[in-house]
Each structure stands twice: as C-alpha cells, then as structure tokens.
Image (cartoon, helix red, strand yellow):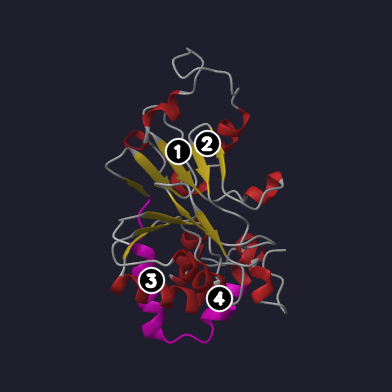
Amino acid sequence: MNLKRTLVVGDIHSGLQALKQVLEKAAITEKDTIIFLGDYIDGWSEAVETVNYLLQLKEKYNCIYLRGNHDELCYEWLTGKADNPTWFMHGGEATSNSYGNASKETKDLHLKFYENLQNYHLDSESRLFLHAGFTNLKGIEHEYFKKTFYWDRTLWELALSLNKDLEEDHIHYPKRLKNYSEIYIGHTPVTRIGKTTPQKAANVWNIDTGAAFKGPLTVFNADTKEYWQSEPVYTFYPNENGRN
C-alpha cells in the first residue's frame, strides 16, 4: 500500500501499552504523517516509558507532536516550579512517581521533548490540528493567549451546541469555524457525552476517546475517516486507577 496517510492520535495519558497496540492495528508506515494531539502523560504509570517510546518513534516515522495542557504542567514541574496540587490530583501523581526513577539524562531529554512540542499544525489542505482550541475569530495567528491552544474548551462546546440547520453563509454562523476546512482536537474526552469513538460536530473532530478514564486510545485517518482503537486502556493497567 503506497498511500500517504495523515493519522491523528488522541490523548495517550501514559497508556503506552494501548499506544503500541493501536499503532500496530493502524499498520503505520514511513509514508504516514502521524500527528499526536498532546497529553502524552498524566494518568497511567508509564509516563517516562511513553515519552521514551515517542522519541524512538520519531527516529523512524514522520511524527508531529503537539502540546497538551498536561505536558505543559509536567514541564513546569520538571523545571522546578512550585508543586501544583491540582495537577497532582489529575494524573500528575502517577507521572511524578514515574519520573522518580528516571536519570538526569532521561529528564534532560524529556525536557527538550516538552520544549519542542508545537502549539498547532496547519496542513496544506487547511486542516488544523491542535490539542484544545482557539478563541480568536480570525484564527490561530491572531490568538492573544498561547495557552488557549492547549487549555480551551469553548471551541468543542461551540461546535456541539451549534444548530445543525444553520447554513455556513448565515450571519450567525461562527466565524471561528470558517477559517479551516476541518479542525482536529483532543483535550475534552468524548466519554463526557457518553461516547467512546471519534465525534464530529460542525467541522470539528474530537479524537480524545477517554484513554485516561474508561475509554480506548484512537488513531484516526484524517483523509478517509477510518479509525482504529485499542482495548479500553484501563484493561492494560488492572491494578491502577488512572484518572478514574
């Protein structure tokens, strides 16, 4: 198969075993572009191993790593900023435990990984990929607050609440959505609306299928809309709670 695919990977949350399984199911090749939507850590116990695996993956495959809010929180913790009790409660404790056994060399490598994450990726087909969202009506280049790219929840909320009968040329149609042909996000698990498969609202696709909780991890083909899923991630870690 010679097709070049654009594959989108949802929030992993240290679910390395599920990641390996779903990438195998998707049968990734060196011709694919694999876009990771962020939140690599915070959840299950394999934070260090997950980032190590992602670093190895980039040596062979064309990977684009986007920045998630959990990646930023972990980076702040690793660089010696004050402890964040809220982060600790939302998966950070498992990550800090994982880094407890890591060498200085590993931590330094991971700091570079977190520093080099991209806030968004815009491809030649006007498809936007980012962890969370944006708020500026003119689009990403005009966003005032960069943290919005990995913290915003209003984009998905807007897409979900949009009247399906509203035509794109209607004066009330959200200008935000018209900047891009499609928008791919994670950040807000679709398990919150009772789903465990990728969900589309307006032109926004949400690929976070709840890997940190009770859902599977998903790889999504942005060209064909085909997708592959791991077993529910919690089943790989029977003695852990994840973020449940």
Depth-wise, is mark 1 or mark 3 nearer the camera?
1
Main SS of the magenta part reads helix
**Residue depicted at 49% across the width and 51% down the height:** 226
Q: Are marks 1 and 2 in contact (CB under 8 Å)?
A: yes
Q: Of the two numbered discs 1 and 3 on the same chain, state the one appearing first in sequence.
A: 3
Depth-wise, is mark 3 or mark 2 nearer the camera?
2
Q: Which residue is mark 3?
A: 111
> In the depicted view, which residue is nearer to us: 241 or 9?
9
Query: Quarter holding the C terminus?
Result: bottom right
Q: Which residue is mark 4?
A: 17
Is residue 77 visible in the rendered image? The answer is no
Amino acid on which disc 1 is placed: Phe
Instruction: From the viewer's perspective, tell me whether residue 63 is left or right of residue 224.
Output: left
Q: Secondary structure at mark 2?
A: helix
Residue 3 locus on image (x, y percent): 31, 56
Q: Of the two numbered discs 4 and 3 on the same chain, state the one appearing first in sequence.
A: 4
Q: Quadrant of residue 134?
A: top left
* Disc marking residue 134: 1
Q: Which residue is mark 2?
A: 155
Q: CA distance from mark 3 to mark 2?
A: 29 Å
Q: Of the two numbered discs 2 and 4 on the same chain, state the one appearing first in sequence.
A: 4
**Residue depicted at 35% across the width and 77% down the height:** 56
Is residue 123 visible in the rendered image? The answer is yes
> In the depicted view, which residue is nearer to us: 93 or 180?
180
Q: Are marks 2 and 4 in contact (CB under 8 Å)?
A: no
Q: Which residues are magenta?
A: 94-119
Q: Label 4 crowding class (10 Å Cα cut-off): few <14, some 14-19, many 20+? A: some
Judge whether 79 appears above or below 126 on screen.
below
Q: Secondary structure at mark 1?
A: loop
